[in-house]
Image (cartoon, rainbow, N blue to C red):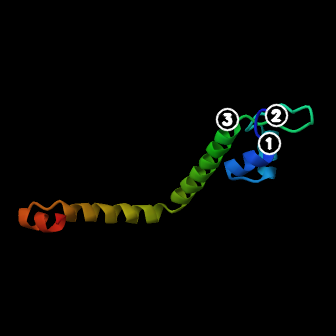
Amino acid sequence: MDGLMIGEVAKQGGVNLETIRYYEREGLIAKPPRSNAGYRAFPIDAVRRIRFIKQAQELAVLRKFFSSAKGHRGLFLRRQAERAKRRTSPDPVRHFRLTF
């Protein structure tokens, strides 16, 4: 049989079998052809697509986190700016001590 069975796709994609079936139902991955015995024969590209979907989900979670923590992000950026100012000193002796 050419292609991967659903268990292999799930394992390589880092998801469970129900996730694969859900992605099929939602149209996120194409329904693969079936073998003569009735098994799904997923192409190798299905694993890449599943990994892509997972990464997109993780990015969405991070985006939601950062948008809900705007105050914390501002504080973080201010601290980063202060550190950068301290690192870029016009005094060459102080600069030398900071870099070594």
CB of mark 2 within 8 Å of CB of mark 1? yes
Which callout, 1 or 3, points to the residue nearer the camera? 1
Please, is residue 31 above or below residue 19 in the view? above
In the rendered image, which residue does mark 3 sit on? 45
The residue positioned 91% from the left and 31% from the top of the image is: 36
Please, is residue 28 above or below residue 12 in the view? above
Q: Of the numbered discs in the image, which one, if any, rests on residue 5?
A: 1
Figure quadrant of the N terminus: top right
Question: What separation in Å lies between label 1 and label 3 (alpha carbons)?
Answer: 13 Å
Q: Of the numbered discs in the image, which one, if any, rests on residue 1?
A: 2
Disc on the earlier residue, 1 or 3: 1
Q: Of the numbered discs in the image, which one, if any, rests on residue 48?
A: none
Circle 1 crowding by C-alpha within 10 Å: few under 14, some 14–19, many from 20:
some
Which callout, 3 or 2, points to the residue nearer the camera? 2
In the image, what residue type sits under mark 2?
A: Met
In the image, what residue type sits under mark 1?
A: Met
**Residue 25: x percent and y percent?**
82, 41
